[in-house]
Image (cartoon, coloured by chain):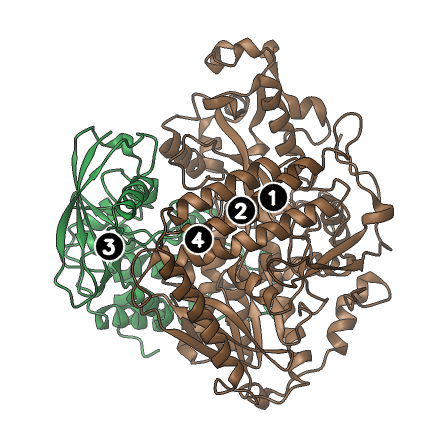
Chain colours: A green, B brown
Amino acid sequence: MNLTLHVWRQKNASDPGRLEQYQAKNISPDSSFLEMLDQVNEELIKEGKEPIVFDHDCREGICGMCSQVINGIPHGPEKEATVCQLHMRRFKDGDAIFIEPWRSRAFPVMKDLIVDRSALDRIIQAYGYTSAHTGGVPDGNAIPVSKTYADAAMDAAACIGCGACVAACPNASAMLFTAAKVSHLALLPQGKVEATRRVKAMVAQHDEEGFGNCTNHYECEAACPKGISVNFIARMNREYLKALPKAD
Amino acid sequence: MILDGKCPTGPIQESWDKHRFELKLVNPANKRKFKILVVGTGLAGGAAAATLGELGYNVEAFCYQDSARRAHSIAAQGGINAAKNYPNDGDSIFRLFYDTMKGGDFRAREADVWRLAQVSNNIIDQCVAQGVPFARDYAGYLDNRSFGGAQVSRTFYARGQTGQQLLLGAYQALSRQVKAGTVKIFARREMLDLVVVDGVAKGITCRNLVTGEIESYWGDAVVLATGGYVNVFYLSTNAMGCSVTATWKAAKKGAFFANPCYTQIHPTCIPQSGDHQSKLTLMSESLRNDGRCWVPKKKEDCGKAPGEIPDEDRDYYLERKYPSFGNLAPRDIASRAAKEQCDDGRGIGPGGRGVYLDFADAIKRFGKDVIAARYGNLFQMYEKITDEDAYQVPMRIYPAPHYAMGGLWVDYNLMSNIPGLFVLGEANFSVHGANRLGASALMQGLADGYFVIPYTIAGYLATVTPGTVKTDAPEFRESAEQVKAQIDKLLSIKGKKTVAELHRELGRVMWEDVGMARSKESLEHALKRIPEIRNEFWENVNVTGTNEEINQQLENAGRLADFLEFAELLAKDALHREESCGGHFRVEHQTEDGEAKRDDENFAYVAAWEFKGTDKEPELHKEPLKFENVKLAVRSYK
C-alpha cells in the first residue's frame, strides 16, 4: 500500500506546530499503524530528516501509552482498539491520513504526537484507591462480592487511562476516566467507608486540572478502546450527589 | 568465588518466619530519615515503593514511561497463583513450592521458592482488599482456574487482564502514598548508571527523557525492579521500552549477573506476519485450558483449510506426547514441541511457522458463550491482529521470547553483591530456576514488592547511617560525565544504519543461534557475530536529533548498546552450561526421545558472572544449589 500522511509536527510546547506531508510506501496491510509509522521513520532517518515522535510501549493495546488522533478520531477508525491495535488493512491504497496528537488544554503537547497526561495521574492520586495497608488484611474470601457486581466493577476497571475520552469530548472532559475509577471502587464492598470522601476529592481534582464537564455527547464511549460505558458517568454523578450533603 | 546466598537453615517450613524475626528493625521514628530509590514501577517496583512509603521511608520512584501505571506488568493476562486450596483439590504451600521447583528444572533456590509459595496467599488477600476485581462465582467467592505446569486450580484471575488489575492495584497504593507525601514519582526518567561509593550503592544517574538533562539522585539504598531483557531477541512479547540497561549498568559497576542464558520462550504467541513486525503478541497461556494444539499429520495437508482436515488426520501432539498434562504441559516443553512439529515440515500458516490452537471441541462442550466469557478479550485481540475469527477457525500460535529467568544475582534478602543494591521481580534471578511456570511472574513481582523487601531492606538500613552520601560526592559527578560522554558519542557517529536495523540484526543472531535450541556451533557463531555487530554499531549507527529534547532514537540507541554487550554474556553462559534444563536446551544434551537432559553432578549451581570489561572474559562465580526438601528427579510431564 502507498499512503499520503499529514502529520502534526511540533518541536515543543511553545512551538505553534503544523501539519507536514509524508509518503508511506510499500506498507503491508498486515502491519499495525505504529509499524507503518516505524517504516516511515526509517525512511526519514535515511533521508536525514527528523523522525516523527510518538508515545507507544506495549503495542498490545493495554498499556494506554499510544495516543494519536487519526482522521479526526482518537485511536482511529477501528472500534474498541488502541492505535497499536489498528491495522493497515483498515485503510485503502492511496488514502490520505491525518495524524494529530490528543487535543485538550489539560494535555499540553510535548513534542509532535506526545502530550502530557499527568493530570490523569493526579486524579487517581486525589483518591482513586482504597486505603488498604500492606499486610493485615482479611482473607480474600472473607469479603464475598456478588458475581454481578464483581463483573461490573471489572467492566469499569478495564480503563487503560489513555485519555482518548478527553480527546474525543467537545468539552475535553475526563469524566469517563474519573467515573470508571469511581465506579470500579463504588461497586465493591472494599473501601466503602471512604466512598464519600473519594468521589468528592476525585471530582474536585478533575475540575482543577481544567477538564470540562459532561454534556452527554457520548463521544467518549464511542472513542474508548476498552468500551467503557457512559453509564458509569451516571453512576459517578449519583455517587457524587449522594456524597454532597454528607460531612465526611 | 563460591557465593553464599545466605539462606536460612533449619526446617524449610519455618525458614522465612524465623528469618523475618531475626532481621533487624528500623525504629518507626527513624524511617523517615532514610531515602530509598526504587527504579521501575511495575508489580515489583510499584508494590515496593508503595509499601516502603507506607512504612514511613522517603521513597523516590522512577519510570521511563509517562506514568507508573504503564509498566509492562500491565500486559500480563492470565493470572496469579496462590496456594489457597479454595477448590479443595489438594493444593498446599508445599505443592506450590514443589511445582515451582520442578517447573524450574531444579535450578532455583529452595528457600526463595518456599517463601514465594508461602506469601502467595497474602498477595491474594492484599489485592482483594485493594479492590482488584478478581473473578467470582455466584456465591461471591473467588474463582480459580488451572494453568500450564500444574494439576490443581490455583490461578486467580481478573478476566484476561490480571496483570493490568494487579498493577493498577499497586499503582493505586502508590498514588495514595504520593498524596501522603512519602513517595515522589519521577516519570519519563531512564536510569543510565548506578552510583557506587566505597563499594556501596548510593544513588543513580538518570536522563530526563523530556529535557535530556542528566540528573543525579542519592539514596541510602537502591532498589532495581526494571524487568527482563528478552528484547535482546528484538522480536519478543515485551513492551518496546523493556531493556537490560539498568541491570547491565549495575553489572558494569560490579553486580554479578546470574544465569543470563535462562530465557523463556512462550508457546502461545501470534506468529510473525512479515518483516515489518515490531513485536510479537502473546495470547494468554490460559487458552491452553480449553484449546487443543494440533498440526496436520501429513505434510501435504498443511496448506489446506483446517476444517478440511478430518480428526484422524490431525496430530494432537501435546496430548500424544504428554498424556497426563496434555495441552497444559509447561512452557518450555510446549514451545519445543511446537518447534519440532514445524521443523518436521508440518507447521501451518505463513512460512510454516505455526500450530493450531483449536477451540472447536470446547465450544461444542460448553457453548460459545462460556468460551467467550472465559477468553472473549483474547479472541477479540486475536481477530484484530490476524483478521481471523477464532470461534470459527482455530487460532494459529508459535513460540516467542517472553520472560527472563536470569537477572542480577541476589542473596536471600534480595540484595546483590553490591551492598545497598536490591533487585526485585524479573530483574533478579531468584525463584524461577531455568523455566517459569504460568501465573508465577505476577506472584514473584508482588511477593518481592509487598512482602519481602519491606522486611529485608530494614535489616540492611539498620546497619547504615542515613544521608551520609549526597549528590555532591565526586562519584556522582564522574557517573554523570560518563553518561554524558556515551550520549555525545552516540550522537556524533552519524553513520548509515538505523538503530532498528542493527537491533534486527542482533535479534536474528540471537533467535537463530541462542534461541529455543542451542549448540556449541551455533553459540560460537553467535559469539563471533555479536562483537561484529557491536563494532558496526559504534562505527555506523545513525542517531538523529540532539540530547536536549525528546529523542527516541537516542533512547533506543542507548538500550541497544547495552543489549550488544549483554548478548555476548548470554551466549557465553549458554555455551558454558553443558546441559539442558528448562528454557535452556543444548542439542548436545538430550535424551533419546528428544527431552532435555540435566547434569546435576556438574551443573547444579547458579552461574553468576562478574563483568571485567567489554573485551575481556567475564569471571564465573558459582553458588551451589542444595536440595534438602525436594528430590532431584527427571522432570517428566508424561
Distance from Cα at disc 4 to Cα at disc 1: 17 Å
> Vertical placement of B334 versus B244: above or below?
above
Residue A187 position by quadrant: bottom left
Image disc number at residue B532: 2
Q: Is residue B482 above or below residue A178?
A: below
**Disc 3 to disc 4, C-alpha distance:** 31 Å
Distance Cα–Cα, label 3 vs label 1: 40 Å
Q: Secondary structure at mark 4?
A: helix
Which quadrant is the N terminus of chain A positioned in?
top left
In the displayed structure image, the side of residue B458 where residue B562 appears, left or right: left
Chain letter for the residue marked with disc 2 in the picture: B
The residue that mark 3 highlights is: A113
**Pointer 3 local density, CA inside 10 Å: few below 14, some 14–19, many at least 20:** many
Closer to the chain start, of discs 2 and 4, is: 2
Q: How far separated are the C-alphas under marks 3 and 2?
A: 36 Å
Point out residue B104 in the picture as x, y percentages from the top left corner: 71, 47
Chain that bears disc 4: B
CA distance separating discs 2 and 4: 11 Å
Asked if badge 3 and badge 2 are on a common chain, one would say no
Kindly report which numbered mark, 3 or 2, lies closer to the viewer in this rendering: 2
Give the secondary structure at mark 2.
Answer: helix
Quick one: label 2, few (<14), some, or many (20+) residues within 10 Å?
few
Q: Secondary structure at mark 1?
A: helix
Q: Nearer the viewer, residue B31 or A50?
A: A50
In screen coordinates, is B596 left or right of A56?
Answer: right
Residue visible at 17% across and 63% down in the picture: A212
Q: Which residue is mark 1?
A: B528
Task: Give the numbered dot on residue B539.
Answer: 4
